[in-house]
Image (cartoon, rainbow, N blue to C red):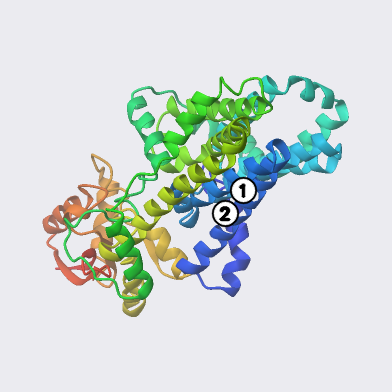
Amino acid sequence: MEMSYLGSLKSWIYAPIFRRWKPSAASIRFPALVFGGITIWLFWLLLHRIAGYRAATIGSVLLATDTSFLMTTCFDWGPVVLQHLLLVSGVLCLVRFHQEQQRRFLAAGFLFFGLGMWDKALFAWILSGTAIATLVVFPKELWRHFSGRNLSVATLAFCLGAAPLIRYNIREKLITFRANAAFDKSEVPGKIHQVFSTLAGQALFDYIARNDLAGGHPRSPQTAVERVSTRVSQIARDPENGFLGFALLAAFLLFPWLWFTPARRPMAFSLIAATVAWLQMLFGKGVGGSAHHVILLWPYPTLFIAVAFAEASRRLGSAGKPLLALVVLFLAGSSLLVTNEYLALLIRNGPGEVWTDAVYPLSDYLKRVKPPAIYADDWGMINILTLLNRGSMPLRVGTDPLLKSQLDPEDRRMVLDRIAESESVFATHPGELELFKGVDAKLMAMAAEAGYRRETLAEISDRNGRPMFQVFRFRR
């Protein structure tokens, strides 16, 4: 386990990749995009089996152009890529087990579910939603397959996939659930807004791409691709909202009309599964208020839309196909324009404060200086620097114990010992960019009290010329 709810499955996958391809933006993101592409392909296969060719085509087109799905997949923010891949793989295997009566698909499906739980225990949200939806919508099919042998195969396969998580919780007395399961309804309005924001594709503006020029230093497009992207953005008038939310609303309105059609059960299944999972986010403490949690509901909303639109187009006769094509092209095109807006903003305004490309020159500078210790005195740099340098950089967490409201004598001695290390350096975000507010001020006050002054060594800027990091040390 990496954390109480996060397993190391991704580390196992990336370890052989990094042996042959050094850690970089490309080596991190390319495999994630491949996994995302496989997820879309498997989603097409799943929809084709349960709802036919038309629904599969609609669903795969909408998912492949969905801005939030694409952005969170590319940056694997969450992380979410393996969660989507394992969910779709597991459900597809169980559908094949039902249709083909081969237990190897039953074992594979529950193995994928177990791996999903180990990868990120929050997989329990969507897995429980899937289980309840199956029980409600397909009770007869479930009972038909219920036997001691099938139950044994499913249980063993699931436990095999989730074995590290199970072992960890046996040893640590269910810490995954004790540390991460709590009820809270104070953030419900914000969490509801986040669902609509994720559906519209706007949730990651300002986080991954800066969408204002308050920081100054706008950058002109340099390449043909950059010029085309910014020009498309201007023509489209800087779109930041897609229409998948309206498509989902339309599918809801169509549901009563389609109740007595083959679309009813796959639509009900996806609706129940997503609702059960979302309710756990809605009332969970510290969860569900960000896009990387909401996106874990995918691809069930897309499945709901695809099945509804496919069946509705059949009911409209000869006018159904051309009308459906126009609707899907409009939805996909509007989503692509929002995705392009992220690119255009990255070109002009650069990345946000956290997802900054200034980490690359920061890494290069620290490698040249070669200090005996580097204290990261703010959030958002230590893990990236560790990865880029394969763990070879002498990085230390500098925010502990300065995050405490009151420091005891041992804490103060620890901080003063760092300050006294004349060759060690400290790295932080400057001024208003500080994420752990007050840490730098507390460090400066303790240094001044002990008779030390701050000596700035470097100010590291992003490609737009905005200062994002400061490197300094202390001198008497």
In the picture shown, does residue 364 fall above or below 86? below
User: Residue pushed farthest bottom?
Assistant: 368
Q: Amino acid at mark 1?
A: Leu
Question: Is label 1 in contact with label 2 (beta carbons under 8 Å)?
Answer: yes
In percent of width and height, residue 375 lies at 32, 61
Badge 1 density bin: few <14, some 14–19, many ≥20, Cα 10 Å: many
Q: Amino acid at mark 2?
A: Gly
Q: Is residue 45 left or right of residue 245?
A: right
Q: Which mark is residue 85?
A: 1
In percent of width and height, residue 369 lies at 31, 78
Q: Is residue 191 left or right of residue 460?
A: right
Residue 173 appears in the figure: no
**Residue located 27% across and 55% down the image:** 210
Quadrant location, the C terminus: bottom left
In percent of width and height, residue 109 lies at 73, 41
Q: CA distance from mark 1 to mark 2?
A: 7 Å
**Residue located 29% across and 58% down the image:** 235
Badge 2 density bin: few <14, some 14–19, many ≥20, Cα 10 Å: many
Query: Which secondary structure, mark 2?
Result: helix
Quadrant for residue 284, please give it: top left
Front one among 235 and 142: 235
Query: Which secondary structure, mark 1?
Result: helix
Provide the residue designation for mark 2.
Answer: 36
In the picture shown, does residue 293 fall above or below 392? above
Residue 300 appears in the figure: yes
Q: Is residue 260 left or right of residue 289?
A: right
In the picture shown, does residue 35 fall above or below 177? below
